[in-house]
C-alpha cells in the first residue's frame, strides 16, 4: 500500500506556506510564489512582479506535493499512516528532500526510535539563514510543532 498526503497534512502545508500570488523573496531570500513554490521562480520574476492565479497556485502545489511524496516514500523504510507520511512531506516540502535524506530525523524514524527522540530531531529544524546567519524563525518553530503533532497523532 502506498501512502498519500492526508487532508490534514495538505491543510498544514497550505496554512504554513500561505498563498501569495505575486512572486516574492521568502525570509531565506529564495524567490517564491503561490504556496511556497520555488522550483520555477527566479529573481527576475520577483523584480518583474510576476503573478499567478489561485488555480495556478493550486496546480503548482499539487505538482510539488507529488514530487515530495516520491522523495519521502523512497527514503522512509518503515510503515506510516497517511498523517505521518503527510507530516514528513510537509517537512521535506519546506526543507527539501536532500536535507530530509541526510537528517537524523529520517534515521530515527527508520530506526523506530521513540517519539521523544523523533520529536527532538524534528523540532531542531526551526532555523533558516537570514542575512547569512542561521536563526530560529517563529513561523518555522510553529510549523515544526504542528508537523510533529500530526506525526504523533496528537
Image (cartoon, rainbow, N blue to C red):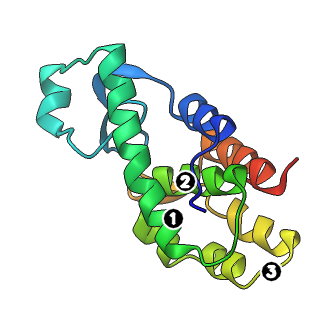
Residue visible at 57% across and 50% down in the picture = 4
Q: Residues within 10 Å of mark 2 (few under 14, many from 20)?
A: many
The residue that disc 1 covers is 72
To which quarter of the image does residue 24 belong? Answer: top left
Secondary structure beneath dot 2 equals: helix
Please tell me whether residue 33 is drawn above or below residue 134 in the rendered image. Answer: above
Please tell me whether residue 2 is drawn above or below residue 28 in the rendered image. Answer: below
Number of the front mark, 3 or 1: 1
To which quarter of the image does residue 11 belong? Answer: top right
Percent x, y for residue 28?
A: 40, 47
The residue at the far bottom in this view is 111
Left or right of 24? Residue 148 is right
Residue 90 vs residue 25, the one in the foreground: 90
Percent x, y for residue 96?
A: 42, 60
Residue visible at 66% across and 44% down in the picture = 143
* Label ID, residue 89: 2
Q: Circles 2 and 1: CB distance less than 8 Å?
A: yes
Q: Residues within 10 Å of mark 3 (few under 14, many from 20)?
A: few
Comes first in the chain, label 2 or label 1: 1
Residue 112 vs residue 50, the one in the foreground: 112
**CA–CA distance in space, label 3 to label 1:** 18 Å
* Label ID, residue 113: 3
The residue at the far top in this view is 53
Residue visible at 20% across and 29% down in the picture = 46
**CA–CA distance in space, label 2 to label 1:** 6 Å
Left or right of 148? Residue 22 is left
Secondary structure beneath dot 3 equals: loop
* Label ID, residue 103: none
Residue visible at 43% across and 31% down in the picture = 35
* Quadrant of image for the N terminus: bottom right
Amino acid at each position: 500500500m502506498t501512502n498519500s498526503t492526508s487532508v490534514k497534512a495538505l491543510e498544514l502545508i497550505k496554512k504554513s506556506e500561505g498563498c501569495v500570488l505575486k512572486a516574492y523573496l521568502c525570509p531565506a531570500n529564495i524567490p517564491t510564489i503561490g504556496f511556497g513554490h520555488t522550483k520555477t521562480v527566479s529573481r527576475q520574476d520577483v523584480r518583474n512582479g510576476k503573478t499567478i492565479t489561485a488555480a495556478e497556485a493550486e496546480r503548482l502545489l499539487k505538482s510539488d506535493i507529488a514530487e515530495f511524496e516520491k522523495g519521502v516514500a523512497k527514503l522512509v523504510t518503515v510503515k506510516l499512516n497517511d498523517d505521518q507520511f503527510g507530516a514528513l512531506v510537509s517537512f521535506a516540502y519546506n526543507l527539501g528532500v536532500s536535507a530530509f535524506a541526510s537528517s537524523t530525523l529520517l534515521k530515527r524514524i527508520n530506526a523506530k526510535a521513540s517519539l521523544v527522540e523523533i520529536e527532538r530531531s524534528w523540532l531542531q529544524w526551526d532555523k533558516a539563514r537570514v542575512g547569512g546567519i542561521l536563526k530560529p524563525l517563529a513561523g518555522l518553530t510553529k510549523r515544526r510543532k504542528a508537523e510533529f503533532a500530526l506525526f504523533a497523532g496528537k
